[in-house]
Amino acid sequence: MSYGRYFEEFAVGQVFKHWPGRTITEADCTWFALLTMNQHPLHSDAHYAETYTQHKQRVVLGPLVYSIVIGMSVADISGRAIANLEVDALKHEKPTFIGDTLYAQSRVLELRESRQGDRGIVTVETIAANQRGDQVCSYTRKVLVPKKTHATLGEGKLPF
């Protein structure tokens, strides 16, 4: 399968197991906190987390978990996307810790052709779990995906 799918290549109920998993490192957590200017010590201060929090260790930032999980799904879901339209019902069910490995899968909930006729909206639910099988994150997402008849630059061709 090439990178991403056309609208016609999706079916309601279809399940994609995204591979490979992704282990979150200390560097991932630190850089994401710095890039997003999140200064909460729960994410960056091991002594603080061990002494003053219920988990006794640093917790990976929720937006980092979500970003990694959505990235894991791109090759299967939105690799050909025209646009990401909506993310809904984002939940962080359990904390993710440095060293945890995330695995994700998506299920197609709905398909709707657009008025233009050369594209459609794919609605998926994505669920992520850690290496222990604990569900840590879930959300639904709507993606505008071209049909095979959609005018593009051409398969595998660069614009230059």
Image (cartoon, grey):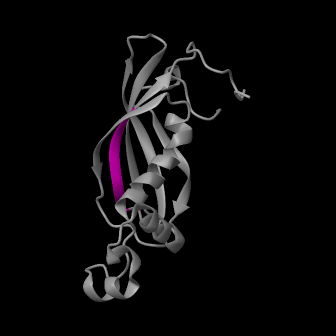
| Residue 39 image point, x, y percent | 35, 72
Q: Decide if residue 124 is on the left or right side of residue 8.
A: left
Q: Decide if residue 143 is on the left or right side of residue 23.
A: left
| Residue 151 image point, x, y percent | 59, 15
Q: Which residues are magenta?
A: 134-142
- Quadrant in which the N terminus appears: top right
The residue lying toward the viewer, choosing from 32 and 91, is 32
- Quadrant in which the C terminus appears: top right
Tell me which residue sits at (34%, 50%) in the image.
Answer: 138
Tell me which residue sits at (54%, 24%) in the image.
Answer: 6
Count of labels in the image: 0
The residue lying toward the viewer, choosing from 67 and 39, is 39
| Residue 115 image point, x, y percent | 38, 11
| Residue 97 image point, x, y percent | 41, 71
Q: Decide if residue 113 is on the left or right side of residue 92.
A: right
Q: Is residue 33 visible?
A: yes
Tell me which residue sits at (46%, 69%) in the image.
Answer: 29
* Residue 72 on the magenta span: no
* Residue 139 on the magenta span: yes
Q: In which quarter of the view is residue 21 placed?
A: bottom right
Q: Is residue 38 above or below residue 51?
A: above
Q: In which quarter of the view is residue 135 placed?
A: bottom left
Q: Is residue 8 above or below residue 27?
A: above
Q: Main secondary structure of the magenta part?
A: strand
Q: Is residue 131 visible?
A: no
